[in-house]
Amino acid sequence: MFPLLAALLTGVRLLASGPVPPDTVVGVVRDAGAAPLQGARVTLVELERSATTDTGGRFALETPPGTYRLVVSLAGF
């Protein structure tokens, strides 16, 4: 189970595709096979802000400037 969890966490890729407002973290959560994961919870720990991924595994979180820990969770992983 650990390799799958590691693949999930390392599968978070921060992307800037298209216009993104300043101070927004955007990304795609994928499984070990590179399939997008719908319904994953993405949390910026220090801000206690979360977003849920859409059908394409995409998420966006507005943030003030800073350094944050990003945690991804999904039931069954």
Image (cartoon, helix red, strand yellow):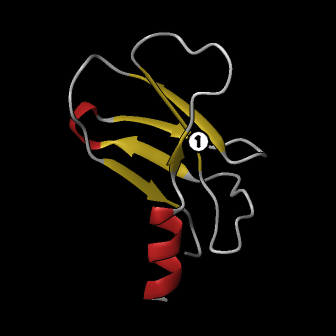
Q: Please give left or right for residue 72 compared with residue 68 in the image.
A: right
Residue that badge 1 annotates: 52
- Identified at 53% across, 81% down, the residue is 4
Where residue 12 sits: x, y (%)? 51, 53
* Front one among 38 and 64: 64
Task: Classify 59 as above or below 29.
Answer: above
Task: Classify 31 as above or below 19.
Answer: below
- Identified at 28% across, 16% down, the residue is 64
- Identified at 21% across, 25% down, the residue is 66
Where residue 2 sits: x, y (%)? 43, 86
Q: Quadrant of the C terminus?
A: bottom right
Q: Crowding at label 1, few (<14), some or many (≥20) Cα neighbours within 10 Å?
A: many
Q: Determine the image quadrant of residue 72.
A: bottom left
Task: Classify 5 as above or below 25.
Answer: below
- Identified at 55% across, 63% down, the residue is 74
Where residue 71 sits: x, y (%)? 37, 53
Q: Amino acid at mark 1?
A: Thr
Q: Determine the image quadrant of residue 76.
A: bottom right
Q: Please give left or right for residue 31 compared with residue 24 in the image.
A: right
Where residue 39 sits: x, y (%)? 65, 51
Q: Secondary structure at mark 1?
A: strand
Q: Please give left or right for residue 8 compared with residue 28 in the image.
A: left
Q: Determine the image quadrant of residue 9.
A: bottom left
Question: What number of labels is visible?
Answer: 1
Q: Residue furthest bottom?
A: 1
